[in-house]
Amino acid sequence: MSTSTIHDIGYRHYDGPRSGRAYVLRSLYVHNLRAAFGLGRPARAKIMPFLLAAIMLLPAAGSVAVFAFTDQEDALIPYASYANIMQVIVAIFLATQAPVLASREVRFHVIPLYFSRPVGHLDFVLAKSAALATALFALMAVPVTLLYVGGLVAKAPDPGKQVLEYLGGLVGCVLFALVLAAIGMVIAAFTPRRGFGVAAVIAVYMLSTTIVGIVQGIAEERTNFTLQGWAGLGAPFNLVDIVQVRLLGAESSSVGIAPGVTGGVVALALCVAIVLGSIAVLYRRFRKAGLS
């Protein structure tokens, strides 16, 4: 018979300071924010996010250059309209990066490993959603800031008005980021393979935009402009644009805008519902994926 030997390899309980929930939440947030831009990953993971970020900057730089040479205020793209004008690039960024944050852990069944440490279920969801929203905000806010700074350097008229419009544009960027991140994360969380996640996010964006465009076109032909405005609630970019126009006093960059302050309040309430609803859905989804 063989004999067994017990070796004391010196494991001891940790008695030092513990960083707590805030440190865990911050670490998860920073990790996912870096992942959204491919930082800490192979070079090929950085190509798409930084290429799209560069493309987002080009119209802003061109607009500032034209304004500097012509002194025509109309040459500057309105701050609140920038994200809507560049919505295709923003949608591609969302489609390519949302699966990076929401799909990989589901596909490789590693979500329970996060909970070998004291990570709360809600903390996990909030950190990922906040990281994607921050990445989207940076994607949109940096060119808007370039427009503002470039306009000031080129001596745009009425600096006080420029400040207010710039701040309104940043608020719009926050709304765009929150709503788009909420939608993208939910779609990506149910598509474990990244390729399917990219296709699903693009499909939702194209279908919603196309259907809303068709409805608005029919409503315009029948001179039903009220229906045309309310139909804009069905597309994410139109939805946020309604809030900007009706509640923040921005210029409209959409075909149809829901009428009056009521339209803005309804659009804002829908934005809040989308964000809170996505958190609830992601919470349940990741629990089923192993957070029990």
Image (tube, rainbow, N blue to C red):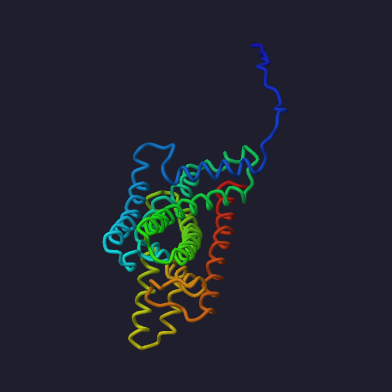
Q: Residue at x 49, y 65 (%)?
A: 164
Q: Tell me residue 20's x, y (percent).
A: 67, 40
Left or right of residue 42, residue 165 in this image: right
Image quarter of residue 12:
top right
Q: How many marks?
A: 0
Q: Tell me residue 147's x, y (percent).
A: 38, 58
Which image quarter is the N terminus in? top right
Q: Is residue 160 visible?
A: yes
Q: Is residue 200 visible?
A: no
Q: Tell me residue 141's x, y (percent).
A: 44, 56
- Residue 288 versus residue 189: which sits nearer the camera? 189
Image quarter of residue 77:
bottom left
As displayed, is residue 76 above or below residue 12? below
As displayed, is residue 19 above or below residue 78? above
As displayed, is residue 209 above or below residue 263? above
- Residue 90 versus residue 96: which sits nearer the camera? 90
- Residue 114 versus residue 159: which sits nearer the camera? 159
Q: Tell me residue 197's x, y (percent).
A: 41, 53
Q: Residue at x 36, y 50 (%)?
A: 53
Q: Residue at x 47, y 68 (%)?
A: 240
